[in-house]
Image: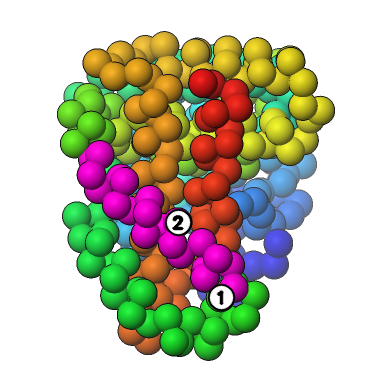
Amino acid sequence: MVLTAGERDYLCDFVGVLEDRYSKFFGEIVMVSKISGLEINSSNLLVTGSKGSVVVKLLGNNEVINHSSQVSIYRQIAKLDLPAPKILGEHSGNGSGQPFLVMEYIPGQYFSGSQLDLSLTGSAIKTLHQGFSDYSGINIPELEVIQDNSHDILNRFLATRDHWELKFGPELELVIRQHIDLVVQTEAICSDSIAALLEEKRSVLHMDLHPHNIIVGSGRATIIDVDSLKICSWPSVLGFGFYKLARQTLAKNTIGTNNLAGLRDFFTVISSDFSSKKNIVEICYLGALTEILRRIIIIFEGNLDAQVSPWNEVLEIQLRALTEVPFIFNQYLR
């Protein structure tokens, strides 16, 4: 992927610091490229050297504030040998450009949804979450279950419907109009049921378990984007993660009895450390809907007034998810 102008300007100092401090991990730098995936405004760079490769994460303004938290998370990963990238070094940026983290490069392929992928990924997710069951001493941010003012944001967005075509273009506007009644219905259901999620124990979990955040290779699965470890609602995380990975399984593989058994086993593994007074499938179904709604509301709010949300390109995906979640849960878990 092409680097931004700012990243290109930064490369001179950046390469100098890398070669001076971290060349033992990769040798002489051959190429620096931007890692592409599902991320928007990804700041991960792949540094390819004569002896190997590393991943460098450039830290933005918000991430600099949480720099010590990220380092603590990576140290916990290394200490317990958790299935996530290990940190190799850090640069605070003092006196020399933008701060960054240097991480090991994990070779492999994105999660494909095969039966082997499901088995390896289920174990990796469970192990990663177990590794942060005690997070004392680590400053990890909390993630809201849903916005307190979600109803107000939705109503404000609805009031702008006459301007949707100008804001989103005709194709996305049509998708919004096709799904907006379902968004309103889902917001009402989730708001009425929010107490059920709030009474569940909050844990440190990876809140963005989608196929491009899982690398499978050499007989193991590795969870990347550990910035997504937050203190959050486990039904929302597990429900959303199950939906995203089950969707990939169904899209990339022949649908049959093996899918049914594999997806049920996968759900059992990732949810086995959690208990609820309610049916676990039902509470995770509610969690999945609520997490998708939370993301939709973020995008809607980002388009209020004269704003244009950088997340508009994934709005259609989130809207269609509201119809896909019921199908997947009904077909494979109930």
Residue most extreme to the right: 254
Above or below 290: residue 156: below
- For the stretch drawn in magenta, the main secondary structure is helix
Q: Nearer the viewer, mark 2 or mark 1?
A: 2
| Numbered label attached to residue 40 | none
Q: CA distance from mark 2 to mark 1?
A: 15 Å
Identify the residue position indicated by label 1 in the image.
Answer: 173
Colouring used for the render:
rainbow
The answer to if 192 sits in the magenta stretch is yes
Above or below 145: residue 64: below
* Earlier-in-chain disc, 2 versus 1: 1
Could you tell me which residue is drawn at 69 percent across and 31 percent down? 249
Residue 66: percent from left, percent from top: 29, 48
Q: Which residues are magenta?
A: 174-194
Density class for disc 2 (Cα within 10 Å; few <14, some 14-19, many ≥20) is some
Name the one closer to the observer, 310 or 195.
195
Identify the residue position indicated by label 2 in the image.
Answer: 182
Could you tell me which residue is drawn at 52 percent across and 38 percent down? 326
Q: On the rendered image, what quadrant is the N terminus found in?
A: bottom right
Quarter assignment of residue 246:
top right
Left-right relation of 204 to 112: left
Name the one closer to the observer, 9 or 4.
4
